[in-house]
Image (cartoon, helix red, strand yellow):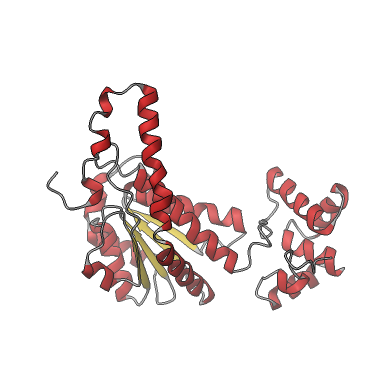
């Protein structure tokens, strides 16, 4: 294909994909998808470094900002949108910037990715500063919008990283604090990076934000204790967490969660330490929101 980018190469295993039966097609795509998790695992050190950079940004009062175009941009916006309801975090902590803006989320605007100045302007619009971490996502590695955004972010003092699915070149490595490059190989449909590259991207973004939120104390054991009971599903989940950890029946768990204004962490402290909601929040604030520092943890059996 006369293109050095791995994402643009032809996959020799799918050159006759248009002749396959539906079942053969499904089996081929599934077989190709199996390589994604392995490729992501091979980037474990870079992903862990990124988690630490994100945690450092949060603890300094900064943000995680994703920048991408097309599928990459949509995945960044999606991950940013999912964090507040999952972890009870401030919506300002994680942002997603997509070339073409909001309209590009639901209708492709491919030409928007070609303007590096628009990428820089998007960074200025977010008032990016030295406490922020900006992660560019461009599976081909060459999207001008993303490079323009990252250059501007670095000029403003922000830390930056780059996620791509082709071999990174030396100048790219030198320019950023971290490079994540899962080499998932050519797509079954040549150049269709919404497939394996998109799957790898989704997996990596999930790990980054989940890891950062865990390190900030928003998970207790493996339970989502920083959720707010703002709907029936979350109300039920919150009650079940209280029932499990504190040994309560459903009625008592419901009453306790209501007294805590739907905040599971506060309710757990109230039930364990026999304190008021305001005192529970004070104790939690003193320990930077880390529940285990207030009531012990699940692994050593110290929770009553």
Q: Is residue 60 above or below residue 224?
A: below
Decide if residue 43 is in sight here: yes
Residue 88, picture quadrant: bottom right
Task: From the top left corner, tell me how far across and down residue 276 is, in percent.
Answer: 84, 68
Task: From the top left corner, tell me how far across and down residue 218 is, in percent.
Answer: 63, 63
Residue 219, picture quadrant: bottom right
**For residue 71, side relative to residue 191 (left or right):** right
Looking at this view, is 137 or 144 the one in front? Answer: 137
Quarter occupied by the C terminus = bottom right
Q: Is residue 107 above or below residue 121?
A: above
Quarter occupied by the N terminus = top left
Task: Tell me the residue at 78%/60% (across/down).
Answer: 260
Task: Tell me the residue at 74%/56% (across/down).
Answer: 262
Task: Tell me the residue at 75%/64% (across/down).
Answer: 266
| Number of marks | 0
**For residue 282, side relative to residue 179 (left or right):** right
Task: From the top left corner, tell me how far across and down residue 269 is, in percent.
Answer: 79, 66
Task: Tell me the residue at 75%/73% (across/down).
Answer: 294
**For residue 281, side relative to residue 162 (left or right):** right
């Amino acid at each position: 294909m006369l293109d050095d980018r791995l994402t643009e190469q032809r996959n020799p295993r799918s050159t006759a994909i248009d002749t396959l039966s539906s079942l053969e097609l499904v089996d081929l795509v599934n077989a190709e998808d199996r390589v994604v998790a392995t490729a992501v695992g091979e980037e474990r050190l870079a992903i862990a470094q990124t988690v630490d950079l994100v945690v450092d940004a949060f603890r300094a009062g900064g943000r995680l900002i994703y920048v991408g175009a097309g599928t990459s941009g949509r995945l960044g916006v999606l991950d940013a949108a999912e964090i507040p309801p999952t972890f009870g975090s401030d919506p300002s902590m994680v942002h997603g910037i997509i070339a073409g803006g909001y309209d590009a989320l639901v209708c492709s605007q491919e030409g928007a990715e070609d303007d590096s100045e628009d990428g820089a302007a998007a960074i200025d619009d977010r008032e990016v500063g030295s406490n922020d971490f900006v992660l560019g996502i461009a599976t081909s590695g060459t999207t001008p919008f993303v490079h323009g955004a990252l250059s501007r972010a670095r000029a403003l003092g922000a830390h930056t990283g780059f996620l791509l699915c082709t071999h990174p070149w030396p100048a790219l490595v030198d320019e950023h604090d971290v490079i994540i490059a899962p080499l998932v190989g050519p797509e079954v449909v040549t150049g269709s990076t919404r497939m394996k590259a998109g799957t790898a991207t989704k997996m990596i973004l999930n790990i980054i934000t989940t890891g950062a939120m865990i390190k900030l104390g928003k998970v207790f054991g493996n339970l989502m204790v920083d959720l707010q009971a703002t709907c029936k599903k979350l109300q039920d989940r919150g009650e079940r967490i209280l029932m499990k950890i504190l040994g309560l029946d459903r009625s008592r768990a419901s009453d306790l969660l209501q007294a805590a204004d739907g905040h599971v962490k506060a309710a757990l402290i109230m039930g364990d330490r026999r304190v008021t909601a305001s005192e529970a929040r004070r104790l939690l604030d003193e320990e930077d929101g880390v529940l285990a520092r207030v009531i012990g943890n699940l692994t050593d059996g110290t929770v009553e």
